[in-house]
Image (spheres, grey):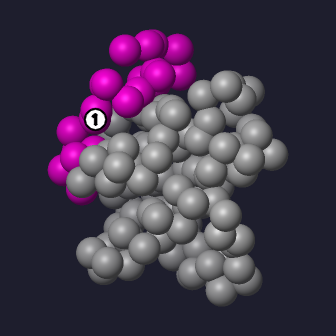
C-alpha cells in the first residue's frame, strides 16, 4: 500500500491554499476523501493518490481535494464526497480506481453524478 508522503501533503495544501468555503473560492468542485483509520485500511490513500494524479493530469485549478476523518460508515469504505458548486454533496462508497476514474470523468469534470456508486445525495437523501 502506497504511503502518503510529505510531498503529497504539500500538493494538497497548495491546491487548497486560501480557500475555506466552496462558495467563496474560485473552485467549482470539492472532493473529500474520508481517511479515518477504517478508510485508510480499506484503501483511501490509494484513492487520494489516484485523485491527486488525475487533477494534475488534467491541470485542473478549480478542484479542491481534501481529506476528513471517519464518516461513521466503516463498512462502506473507501469513500469520497463530491460537492459541485451549487449542487448537493454526493457520497460515493466502496471505491476502487475504476469507479473513481468514472466518478472523476463524469461527476467532477462534467457535473453528472453516478447514482450506481452513490450511497447518498445531500445530507439525508439516498439514491
Whether residue 61 is visible here, answered yes or no, is: no
102 vs 29, nearest the viewer: 102
31 vs 42, nearest the viewer: 42
Left or right placement of residue 53 versus residue 73 in this view = left
Measured as percent of width and height from the top left, residue 100 is found at: 39, 49
Measured as percent of width and height from the top left, residue 9 is found at: 67, 76
| Residue topped by disc 1 | 113
* Segment colored magenta: 106-127
Write the residue at 67% across / 25% down.
Answer: 75
Relative height, residue 87 to residue 31 (above, below): above
Write the residue at 45% across / 13% down.
Answer: 125
Residue at the limit of the structure toward the bottom, as seen here: 7
Write the residue at 56% across / 39% down.
Answer: 79
For residue 78, which quarter of the picture?
A: top right
Left or right placement of residue 91 versus residue 102 in this view = right
Relative height, residue 51 to residue 73 (above, below): below
Which corner quadrant holds the C terminus? top left
Measured as percent of width and height from the top left, residue 55 is found at: 38, 71
Left or right placement of residue 51 versus residue 85 in this view = right
Q: Count every numbered label the image shows and give the total.
A: 1
Amino acid at each position: 500500500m502506497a504511503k502518503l508522503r510529505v510531498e503529497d501533503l504539500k500538493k494538497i495544501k497548495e491546491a487548497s491554499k486560501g480557500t475555506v468555503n466552496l462558495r467563496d473560492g474560485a473552485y467549482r468542485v470539492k472532493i473529500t476523501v474520508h481517511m479515518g483509520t477504517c478508510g485508510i485500511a480499506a484503501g483511501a490513500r490509494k484513492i487520494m493518490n489516484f485523485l491527486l494524479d488525475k487533477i494534475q493530469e488534467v491541470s485542473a485549478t478549480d478542484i479542491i481535494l481534501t481529506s476528513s476523518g471517519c464518516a461513521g460508515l466503516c463498512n462502506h469504505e473507501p469513500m469520497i464526497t463530491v460537492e459541485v458548486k451549487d449542487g448537493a454533496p454526493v457520497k460515493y462508497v466502496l471505491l476502487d480506481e475504476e469507479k473513481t476514474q468514472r466518478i472523476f470523468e463524469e461527476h467532477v469534470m462534467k457535473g453528472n453524478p453516478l447514482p450506481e456508486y452513490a450511497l447518498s445525495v445531500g445530507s439525508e437523501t439516498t439514491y
